[in-house]
Structures are given as C-alpha cells and as structure tokens.
C-alpha cells in the first residue's frame, strides 16, 4: 500500500540520488524521511533560512524493512547502530568499554535492508545516548528519554531499490520564523523534561551499563525489554 513520506531540506529535491548522502548520520548513508509533514518542516529550516518539506509517494511492496522499534529489538540495538555511525565523545574508560561491548553484542545487519525505521538522534536525544554509555542513566531511562518531545520515527531509504520506489509529489515551504521556533521548543522541552523527570529518577532494579558489562548481558535478557 502506497504511503506518503516527507524529507526536510533547505532545497527542493525532486529526485534523490542514491549514494550521495552524508555518511555521518544515525544509520549511515541513506535518505532520511518522516511520515509527519510538520516534522519535515522543522528539519528543513535553519535559524534564518526557510526550508522545504519534500513530499514523496512510497511504494513499499517488495522492499525489506528493518523496524528497530519492533519487539524483536531493544533500545541497545538502536544504540549500537548509532555508535557505529555517529561521533561520540568517548571521554572515559567505561564509555570506551561500553561502545565496544554494544558493537560486539547488539549490532544489527541494517545495511542489508532497503528501509530502516527507528528513533532520530537530534542533539538532545544524542546527549541522552551519551549519558547512557557514560553510566549516568539506565536502560529504562534511555528508552523513556527517546520518547520525550514526541520527535517521532524516521524512515531511512538505504538501497537503490528503495530510492527507485519513491515518486516526488511536490514540496511545501517551511517559514523559518514559524518552524525554527517549533524545532527549538521541541528540543528545549525534551531537555527540560529529561532533567526534571528522567535523569535523576532512579528506580529499584534499573539496569545500567556497568551491570550490563559485568554480567555480560546479551540481547535476549528479559531485563532489556
């Protein structure tokens, strides 16, 4: 069944070109989209420049989709992909050990799929992930933090086949004076709620990276669900 997806940008992109994307993104090379028009408008603007929400029709039939929010995966699978592609500030021995352990035990063959769907690590959300590998917050807190601000789920086209499965419909202009303010408010609200509600609210039984390392906890452990 065909569905609409949106890509926020500072320009109109009628035909995305496979293989010409930035590699340092959440899921590596790919065309990053959302199913929410408003979110694309936020992503498309900058502080003083208007942007566009490019609109596409996607025919998903025959495409393989990796849904990182399905029950098959945990938040640590998402984090392992992020660690592979984004540049983290590894400022401690614990963080370095955590990175190596997660990459070894929670990696997902995401490059084998046509489409990947999962969380988006905007600046504030990226900092939440960094807090986890530094031992500041638990698995539960990280999972909760990723839902703050209602950032939504991104849809990433990873293969030539998926690029060929979209058709450009048009584009809507996003006025920076409206949409940048909304973007900033979403980020600020997520950070505020994180520090007020999540970061310092440890619960009995919370699972931290130190315990995961010490017990060599794997993906099938029920405590990660």
Image (cartoon, helix red, strand yellow):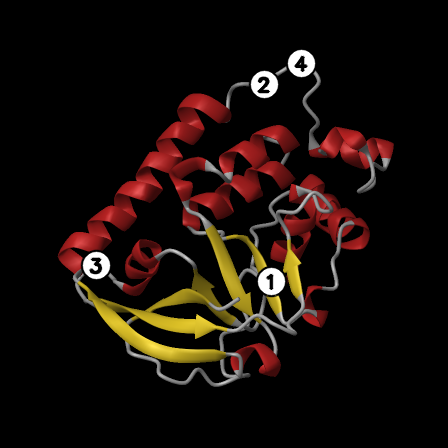
Circle 2 residue = 202
Whether residue 200 is situated above or below residue 147 in the rendered picture: above
Which residue ends up furthest to the front in the rendered image? 1
Answer whether labels 1 and 4 touch (C-beta < 8 Å). Answer: no
Answer with the quarter of the image where residue 149 lies: top left
In three-dimensional space, the C-alpha distance between marks 3 and 2, rounded to whole angstroms, equals: 36 Å
Determine which of the numbered discs, if any, sits on residue 116 in the image: 1
Element type at marker 1? strand
Determine which of the numbered discs, if any, sits on residue 204 in the image: 4
Query: Residue at position x 27%, y 73% from top?
Result: 171
Taking the image as drawn, is residue 138 in sight? no
Q: Looking at the picture, how far across and down is residue 36, in whole percent?
A: 37, 55
Which residue ends up furthest to the top in the rendered image? 204
Taking the image as drawn, is residue 60 in sight? yes
In three-dimensional space, the C-alpha distance between marks 3 and 1, rounded to whole angstroms, equals: 29 Å
- In screen coordinates, is 74 left or right of 31? right
Element type at marker 3? loop
In three-dimensional space, the C-alpha distance between marks 2 and 4, rounded to whole angstroms, equals: 7 Å
Circle 3 residue = 47
């Amino acid at each position: 069944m065909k569905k609409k997806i949106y890509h926020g940008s500072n320009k109109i992109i009628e035909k995305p070109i496979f293989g010409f994307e930035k590699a340092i993104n959440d899921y590596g090379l790919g065309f990053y989209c959302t199913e929410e028009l408003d979110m694309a408008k936020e992503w498309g603007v900058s502080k003083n420049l208007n942007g566009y929400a490019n609109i596409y029709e996607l025919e998903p039939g025959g495409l393989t989709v990796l849904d990182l929010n399905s029950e098959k995966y945990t938040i640590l699978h998402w984090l392992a992909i992020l660690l592979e592609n984004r540049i983290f500030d590894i400022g401690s021995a614990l963080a370095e050990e955590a990175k190596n352990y997660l990459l070894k035990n929670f990696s997902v063959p995401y490059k084998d799929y046509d489409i990947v769907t999962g969380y988006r690590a905007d600046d504030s959300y990226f900092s939440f992930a960094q807090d986890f590998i530094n031992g500041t917050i638990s698995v539960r807190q990280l999972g909760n933090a990723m839902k703050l601000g209602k950032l939504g789920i991104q849809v990433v086209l990873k293969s030539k086949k998926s690029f060929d499965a979209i058709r450009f419909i048009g584009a809507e202009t996003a006025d920076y004076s409206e949409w940048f303010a909304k973007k900033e408010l979403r980020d600020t609200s997520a950070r505020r709620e994180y520090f007020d509600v999540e970061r310092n609210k440890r619960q009995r039984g919370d699972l931290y990276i130190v315990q995961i390392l010490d017990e060599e906890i794997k993906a099938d452990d029920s405590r990660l669900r």
